Amino acid sequence: MKRVKSEPSRSNCPIATTLEFVGDSWSLVIIRDLLTGKCRYGQLLQSPEKITTSVLANRLAKLEDLGLIERRAYSHRPTRYEYRLTEKGAGLLPVLQEICRWANRHVPGTWTPPAMFMAMKPKGSNHL
């Protein structure tokens, strides 16, 4: 897989810096799916947002390079991987929950997240 090159931050602002990690259209959706139990490539492709295979592969590599997820082989012929959040990635749970609350208050028509997701508490690495 092509690896993401580390580039200097454009700012030391914590918001701008965090957006460099997860500010694209897909990273937080992938993290949401990993938090809710999906862990294999095919499962991630089945999300209602319809991510393409090329974008998913790119974002998984980026999230791994940033230390937000890790991958482990679960099959060796052919080699297939499972993806798990690291402690750093799992630490985004409260951020996602607040984004859900904000959207439900201010964006008409957004889905109400499952109560299970909203009740989740941050845990250490490999918590799923």
Image (spheres, grey):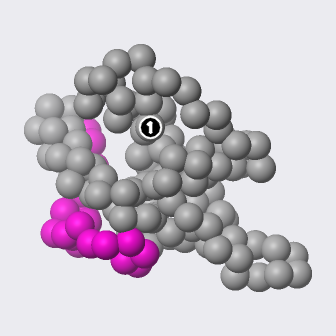
- The structure residue drawn at horizontal position 38% and vertical position 72%, both measured from the top left corner, is 125
- Name the spot of residue 81 as percent of width and height, x first: 69, 71
Task: Write down the quadrant of residue 94 in the picture.
Answer: bottom left
Under circle 1, the secondary element is helix
Q: Is residue 110 magenta?
A: yes
- The structure residue drawn at horizontal position 19% and vertical position 63%, both measured from the top left corner, is 118
Q: From the viewer's perspective, is residue 103 above or below residue 117?
A: above
Quarter of the picture holding the C terminus = bottom left
Left or right of 9 on screen, residue 57? right
- Name the spot of residue 2 as percent of width and height, x first: 76, 43
- The structure residue drawn at horizontal position 57% and vertical position 60%, both measured from the top left corner, is 44
Amino acid type, callout 1: Phe
Left or right of 115 on screen, residue 92? right
Q: From the viewer's perspective, is residue 6 above or below residue 113?
A: above
Residue 24 in view (yes/no): yes
Sort mark 1 into few (<14), some (14-19) or many (20+) by Cα contacts within 10 Å.
Answer: some
Residue at the spot of label 1: 21
- Name the spot of residue 13 as percent of width and height, x first: 26, 24
Read off the magenta span: 109-128
